């Protein structure tokens, strides 16, 4: 009888340890826009990321936050990961550090936003993101039902200089060509700013800039 009691206690102990290591919930996922989460321009639910257009930007810092529930304190044994890709490239994986306990859940947060526009050429771009959490046995996803969360943004053409010409009164238009467009004989039309002033934004390097115009 003593052997049976001892065996029963051991089984209960194993059952308790197995339950303690089980990740059972993953949610309250948000994203922020900004390099520093404490000073982020906005915080929104992850669902708002889908189909979002961030407009024209020269830098686009995106960070994320999520919560998990498991029995052990401090998120011990759990790894939460942020996955993202730009323009349908390979997914990059970033481990999200544990932040604090929040209403009996464990909160995880990227301490700094990631610049999604870094090193990109001018033009339209896409971002695709999702998150997962795992305890080594169970893996839970925040991935829009497997479709991921998708957003768009545009990197503008950099402007190195703005050329301006004051034309005679009544001038209908001014055309310009130069080193910035390899002296294209077709010329390009300058923009009227009113009061006979016409301008053109030069987007190439301005060293040794030369140009000519006619009206």
Image (cartoon, rainbow, N blue to C red):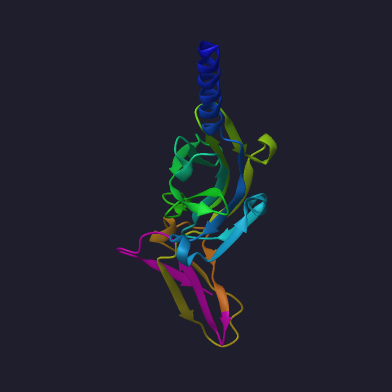
Find residue 121 and report its horizontal and vertical position in percent: 46, 50
| Residue 184 visible in the shown view | yes
Q: Locate the C terminus and report the quarter of the image it occupies.
A: bottom right
Which residue ends up furthest to the front in the rendered image? 1
Find residue 201 and report its horizontal and vertical position in percent: 47, 68
| Residue 122 visible in the shown view | no
Q: Residue at x 47, y 71 (%)?
A: 213
Side of 98 relative to 19 (left or right)? left
Q: Nearer the viewer, residue 2 or 88?
A: 2
Reply above or below: 90 against 106.
Answer: above
Q: Residue at x 44, y 41 (%)?
A: 95
Magenta-span inclusion, residue 194: yes
Q: Quadrant of residue 210?
A: bottom left
Reply above or below: 61 against 98.
Answer: below
Magenta-span inclusion, residue 47: no
Q: Nearer the viewer, residue 211 or 32?
A: 32
**Magenta part of the protein: which range?**
193-215
Q: Nearer the viewer, residue 36 or 74?
A: 74
Find residue 133 and report its horizontal and vertical position in percent: 54, 37
């Amino acid at each position: 009888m003593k052997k049976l009691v001892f065996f029963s206690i051991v089984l209960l102990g194993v059952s308790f340890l197995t339950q303690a290591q089980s990740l059972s919930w993953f949610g309250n996922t948000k994203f922020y826009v900004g390099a520093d989460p404490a000073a982020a321009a906005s915080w929104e639910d992850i669902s708002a990321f889908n189909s979002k257009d961030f407009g024209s930007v020269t830098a686009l810092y995106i960070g994320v936050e999520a919560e998990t529930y498991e029995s052990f304190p401090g998120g011990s044994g759990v790894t939460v990961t942020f996955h993202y890709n730009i323009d349908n490239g390979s997914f990059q994986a970033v481990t999200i550090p544990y932040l604090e306990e929040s209403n009996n859940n464990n909160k995880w947060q990227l301490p700094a936003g990631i610049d999604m526009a870094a090193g990109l050429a001018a033009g339209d771009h896409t971002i695709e993101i999702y998150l997962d959490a795992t305890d080594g046995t169970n893996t839970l996803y925040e991935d829009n039902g497997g479709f991921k969360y998708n957003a768009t943004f545009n990197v503008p053409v950099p402007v190195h200089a703005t050329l301006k010409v004051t034309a005679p009164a009544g001038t209908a238009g001014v055309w310009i060509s130069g080193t910035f467009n390899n002296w294209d004989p077709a010329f390009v039309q300058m923009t009227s700013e009113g009061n006979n002033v016409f301008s053109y934004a030069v987007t190439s390097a301005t060293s040794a800039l030369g140009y000519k115009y006619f009206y």
